[in-house]
Image (tube, rainbow, N blue to C red):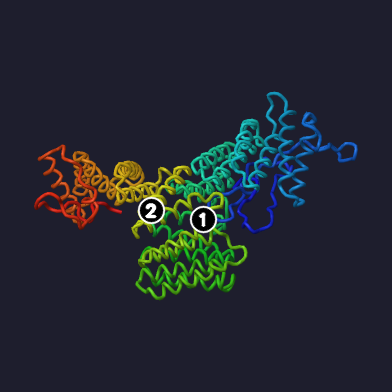
Amino acid sequence: MPGLVSVKTPPDAPPPRISLPDPTPRSDPTPPKPASPLPQEAPSPSPSRSKFSPRKPPPESPSSVPNPALPDSSLDNPDLGPFLLKLARDTIASGDGPAKALDYAIRASKSFERCAADGEPSLDLAMSLHVLAAIYCSLGRFEEAVPALERAIQVPEPGRGPDHALASFSGYMQLGDTFSMLGLVDRSIGCYEQGLKIQIEALGETDPRVGETCRYLAEAHVQAMQFDKAEELSKRTLEIHRAHSEPASLEEAADRRLMALICEAKGDFESALEHLVLASMAMIANGQDNEVAAIDVSIGNIYLSLCRFDESVFSYQKALTVFKSSKGDNHPSVASVYVRLADLYHRTGKLRESKSYCENALRIYSKPLPGTTAEEIACGLTEISAIYESVDEPEEALKLLQKAMKLLEDKPGQQSSIAGIEARMGVMFYMIGRYEEARSSFENAVTKLRASGERKSAFFGVVLNQMGLACVQLFKIDEAAELFEEARSILEQECGPCHQDTLGVYSNLAATYDAMGRVEDAIEILEYVLKLREEKLGIANPDFEDEQGRLSELLKEAGRSRNRKAKSLENLIDPNSKRTKKEGPKRWPGLGFRI
C-alpha cells in the first residue's frame, strides 16, 4: 500500500529500516503491486510512491554544510531543508534508529514551510511531511502521523500537473494506510477512494496502475465486509489487467484469487471455484508451485462448502505435500492445512482423525519457526477453537481464543480481528453460563467494531444480538431491547427482512417487548414475521407454528387486559419454570429467544 514505512515486523526483529522516497522525479502515480492478492491482514503502510524532487542541497564542503544543531531561526535558510531531509534519510539508512531522524525530519518540514513562496504549493514540503509521517509510523506513533499527512494532502494541487497529482495521490493513500493501522476502516477507505479518484483523473480509467489501486481498495472493502463494493472493484481490476497483460498473467491470477474470496464470502461457491481453477492454471504456467499449493487449499475450502468431501481431501493433501517438501514439516503453512483437514474430518464425523490433526497443528503453533507472524498463529488458534466449540469443549475453545487475543492485543491494525475473537469468547462464556463475562466480551467487541467503522456490517448486527441475549440472562431487559432494536435496523439493511439472522432478532425483540409489558409492539412484530413467512418463506418451517402460537396467546392476553403487568423475567427465560396463571399454556417455548 502506498505508505512510507512497513510496520509488518515481528516484535523481536531488529529495528526496521525505513524506506524513504528517493529524490528521483516521478511523473505517474503508480502503486506498487501488493505483496499478496488475498486480504488476510489489515492494510499497512509500505514503501512510498511519493517520489518528488527536493531542492538540490549545496555541495557538502566543510564551509557550506549547514549545522543541524543551529537554532530555529536558521530554518529560514532555503538550503537547510534539503540538507536536513537528506540527513534524516542518511540517518535511517545507517541504522542509527528513527529517533534522531525524527528530529531532522521535523526541522526539515519547518524549514520548507518557512521558505515556501507565498501562494505557491511546495512539493518539497509535501515530501518532507510524508517522510515525517513515515518515521512516526516506524515508532508506532500513528496518531501523530495523521496530522502530518493531513497537512501534506493540502499542499499539492492535482490540476497543476503529474507531480502534484502524484503528491496528492501518495498522501491520500499513505493517510489511508495510517487510518487502517489505527483501526479506522471507514476513514481509511475514504482516503483510498479519494486517492483512486485523483489517479484516474491523472492517468485515465484503463491504466494498469489504476487497476492495482482498484484491487487494493477492493481488499480494504473485503476487510470491512463490504463485499458488493469489493466485487465491483475486483471486476474492474480484472478487466483492466486482461486488456493490458498477457493471458494467464500473475496479475490476472491475483485478481481471480481476490474474486474467489469475495464470491465465497457471498455464498457463490461455483463462481469462486471457477476463479480459483483459472488462477491455479496461471500460477502453474508461471512456475509458482507454492502459490499453486495455496490455491489448492482455497479450492479444498470451496469443495468442503459444497460437501464434495473426497475432492476437498485430495486438494488439501496435494497442498500439504508441496508445503512439506518446500517449507518443512513445521512450517505454519503445514499447520494451516492440518486445521482445514481437522475441520473436514469433524464435519464428516471422523472425530479421532479431526482431533489428531488439531493436535498436530497446535504442536507447530506452540513452537513457531523464526519469521512466523503472530497473526498466522492467532488465525490458526481461532480456527481450532471453532472445532473444539463444535465438539462441546467450550472451555478448551476459550483457552485457545484467549491465547489468540493475547498474541494480537499489541499489534497495530488488528482491532477488527481482536473484536471478532472477543465476540467468539462471548459466545463461549454464554455457552458455559458465565453471562457477565459474556456481556463484557460482547461489549468490548462492539466498542472496537464501532470505532473501526464496521457498525453497519451484518457481523456487527449479529454481535449486538448476542450481547442482547447475554443482557436478558442478566435481567438487563431495557439494555437488551436497545441492542435488539439496533441489531434489527442493521440486519434489515444488510441482509434483508427474510434472512434467518434478521428473523431471529425479530423473535428476540418480540419476547423482550412482552417482558417489558409492551404487548402491542410484540404483537406487531410477530404479525409481521408471520406475514413474511406466509408470503415469501412458506409455512413449512417449524418456527412458523411456534410464532403462530406465541402470537395467539399474546392476542388473547391483550384482549383481556392491554395494561397487564410485565411478565416475570424468571418465567420468561427459564423453560422449566411454572406459569403463575392457572392452567394457562406455557409461553415462549425454547426460551422464546433465538441465538
On screen, 123 above or below 312? above
For label 2, the crowd category at 10 Å Cα-Cα, with few meaning under 14, some 14 to 19 and many 20 or more, is: many
Q: Nearer the viewer, residue 469 or 262?
A: 469
Is there CB contact under 8 Å for labels 2 and 1?
no
Residue to which mark 1 is pinned: 40
SS assignment at label 2? helix
| As drawn, 154 above or below 272 | above
Name the foreground residue: 32 vs 201: 32
Figure quadrant of residue 447: top left
Circle count = 2
Residue 27 percent location from the top left of the image: 67, 40
Residue 303 appears anywhere in the view: no
Task: Judge left or right: residue 463 versus residue 182.
Answer: left
Which three-letter amino acid code belongs to the residue tagged 2? Ala
Residue shown at 15% from the left, 52% from the top: 579
Is 368 placed above or below 196 here?
below
Quadrant containing the C terminus is bottom left
Label 1 SS: loop
Residue wearing tag 2: 438
Q: Which mark is residue 364?
A: none
